[in-house]
Image (tube, rainbow, N blue to C red):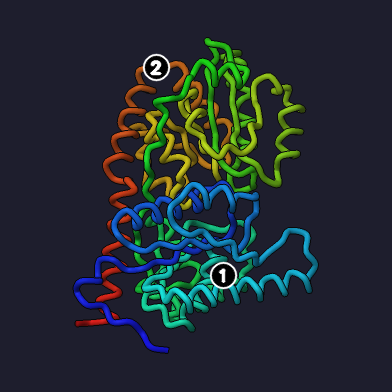
Amino acid sequence: MMTKDFPDSEKKHFSILLIGTQMAIGGAQRGLFDQARWFKSHGCKVVVAFFYDKEGFHEKWKQLVDFPVHNLQAYKRGAGLLRQSTLLLRGLWRLWGLLIRERFDVVETFTHDSNLLGLPPAWFAQVPVRIATHRGKIEAFPRWRQILHSVLINIGIAHTLIAVSEQTRQQAMDEGVWENRITVIPNGVKPLDTSLVNRVVVRKDLGLNESDIFLLSIGRLTYQKGHEFLVQAMSEVVNHFPNAKAGICGDGPLHSQLEKQILQAGLSNHVRLLGAWEDVSPLLASTEIFILPSRWEGLSRALMEAMAAGLPVIAAQVDGIRDLITDGVNGLLVPSEDAGRLGNSILQLIEDAEMRKRLAAAGQAHVLQTHSVDDMCKKYYDLMLGLLQANHPV
């Protein structure tokens, strides 16, 4: 197969395929679309593909963007082994056809699974630049797949692995990826527009009184996110502030377990599971304090969006969060899995309005200055352009 030449006039307008695993509400998906919009607006040809549509978003997403979005239909929940194997092979064949037809200059994959599934076909198709990403520890990711993933990066199926924080870089090395195969580009976020949100209406819809103190956590209901520690902490918080209410936005396998915990703790009037929200800006506009009680994180997009929205934040002192928050300066850090310390920090912020304002202002300034989508995408752009030029010297 012939590879493309890149004369000077074309170097700044390359074509790029961005590959995600599932169409669902999540940080990786929002980050993918942020990049897609940025590259499109800077003159690049952009195509997006996902291996499957988990939550029925394909048709809606196609209508919302001005670039192609493909569903490779490589997975179906509940399918048997034979059926699933057939779907996967057909999905990979669809991806191969897309690669051959479009002859992309760059392929970037956004998760461990899309790294494993998307990059080998791109390598066989001789895509000039292939970029994998690592967004933090993957819950229940088998060791054999971890090893396979590291080998794939180390042998050059990907030109580089992007780690979204220094802590994530260390995680990748612990998994077996060679240090010289890793590039660190921190996540960036675009501040959500809360200007049109009617706070009074949203809070009323959430069942909040005007005097209620609303605490918000956003994240899938999984072991990683540690929401049970927020529920535990709320038992102490409501003893001091009966008007404190907490909302947990997200869905996932631990929904029933958390619901049972809330009921058994007698907190049904104080903690609500809000389900997954595609647009969380109304929640951010209606919140006093944002909580992230995770056991581990790469570089949390939900946390950065809360900080960019001007909320004071409390987060577990884990992984990439330490790259984002300086304790007592632009947020509060608490030990992971420590409901007592989390409760004390919540009480501290509720009682100290001036501290809330100071931390919120510092957090917002930090995220807007150092973690913008524009800065992030410029780094990706420079990396891709440099690799293209290195592979196709003039």
Q: Is residue 206 above or below residue 339?
A: above
Quadrant the N terminus occupies: bottom left
For residue 288, say whether it is visible. Answer: no
What secondary structure is found at the residue carrying circle 2?
A: helix
Residue 385 figure quarter: bottom left
Residue closest to the far bottom: 1
First reached walking from the N terminus: tag 1 or tag 2:
1
Q: Is residue 338 above or below residue 74?
A: above
Residue 140 spot, x, y in % from top left? 64, 59
Q: Residue at x 80, y 67 (%)?
A: 80
Q: Residue at x 60, y 44 (%)?
A: 220
Type of residue at label 2? Answer: Ala
Q: Residue at x 45, y 40 (%)?
A: 303
Front one among 190 and 263: 190
Residue bearing mark 2: 353
> As drawn, is 6 to the left or to the right of 132?
left
For residue 281, say whether it is visible. Answer: yes
Type of residue at label 1? Answer: Gln
Q: Is residue 141 above or below residue 205?
A: below
Q: How busy is the neighbourhood of tag 2: few (under 14 within 10 Å), some, or many (20 plus)?
A: few
Whole-Å distance between the Cαs marked 1 and 2? 45 Å
Residue 367 figure quarter: top left
Q: Residue at x 45, y 72 (%)?
A: 177
Residue bearing mark 1: 146
> As drawn, is 106 to the left or to the right of 258?
left
